[in-house]
Amino acid sequence: MKEAIVYKGPKVLIKDSPIPIPEPDQVVTKVVVSGSNPKDWKRPENGGEGVNQGDDIAGVVHTVGSNVVEFKPGDRVAAFHQMMAPCGSYAEYAVSWDHATFHIPKKTSFEEAATIPLAAMTAAFGLFQRLNLPTPWHPTLTPIPLIIYGAAAAVGSYAIQLAQQANIHPLICVAGNGIPHVESLIDQSKGDVVLDYREGDRELVRNLKAAVEKAGGKVEYALDAVSDHGSYVNICEVLDHKTGKITLVLPGKEYNDIPSSIEKSSTTVGSAQIGTDTDPWQKKTGMQTGNEEFAMAFFRYFSRGLQKGFFKGHPYQVVPGGLGGVEKALGDLKGGRASAVKFVFRIGETEGVAE
């Protein structure tokens, strides 16, 4: 099979690799469409050997491991590939654990499905495992103001959807070029607003303070889907300094500018996989259940939402050339040339791949 290996630059090499064989709890999917994420260019910047960085799988089940009972060959699925493990989604065939694989309805395109796994699960972890906000199946009955910074990007947009399904309002969203997309998601009748960071930090903080005042004068929760360029500094200007909680999505940063009185946490989607979970509940509790079970439940929630119509994928742009387009797309992500869209790749368009 054809497989794309990503190196620092980003540079991409397409090579021939064997079709993977699943372990007992794994699913091998024939990839129809692969999604992409900013981490796909960021991780190789640290150097080291090249890796198939693709983690967003959408396609048809090829084969399953001996313990898998929920999926069979021919099923339409999407899946979250375990980051940095072999056999990612930048290939004709990719591997996922069964708990991180979910069915997609016939009405959902593979392109739409490929925008979901990593970004939507990041949003779910941030809201419900890190900020401990009410879940969609136990929605709040009282207002809970929430700041979502970077609301037009995929993680922020999924956070809007999931927060709304938990009846969390008002949402105080921050975006730039993608403001029209955010406006299509929020519910202004419940006090949701979107603020423009392009007006500069001083004006943004002024507008944040006005939005907080309108929301009741106190905001205790923030999901920072940017976690860079002073985003969290702006948030902390208005987040309650006694009871405030902020969760951030870029690992490896100290965030020393955040006041010690504000509870900060790191949202890493690797928590969905036991092999990349840096803080497993099993270690804390001695029990067998933890973040994997959370991920399994929410992936199936996404599937039901797609079927019932209360959940949808992120806007996408198909990059021509299949795997041949990965290098350009990652370069565009690195250069900030994507706003409110996910780049996706139709693997069948790759040179040398038979449809």
Image: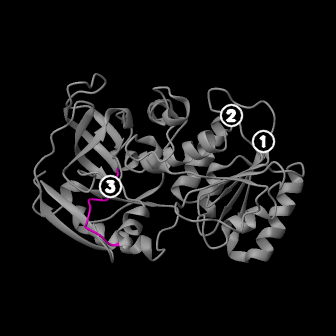
Labels 1 and 2: the sequence-earlier one = 2
User: How many labels were placed on the picture?
Assistant: 3
Q: Position of residue 181 (x, y in %)?
A: 59, 58
The residue that appears at 84% across and 55% down in the rendered structure is: 212
Q: CA distance from mark 3 to mark 2?
A: 32 Å
The residue that appears at 13% across and 63% down in the rendered structure is: 15
Residue 230 horizontal side relative to residue 226, left or right:
right
- Say what secondary structure mark 1 lies in: loop
- Say what secondary structure mark 3 lies in: loop
Q: Say if 66 sits above or below 81 in the image.
A: above
Crowding near pointer 2: few (<14 within 10 Å), some, many (20+)? Answer: some
Q: Which residues are magenta?
A: 47-55
Q: Amino acid at mark 3?
A: Met
Badge nearest the viewer, 3 or 1: 3
**Residue 107 sits in quarter:** top left
- Say what secondary structure mark 2 lies in: loop
Name the residue carrying label 2: 134
Name the residue carrying label 1: 144
Q: CA distance from mark 3 to mark 1?
A: 37 Å
Q: CA distance from mark 1 to mark 2?
A: 10 Å
Q: Are marks 1 and 2 in contact (CB under 8 Å)?
A: yes
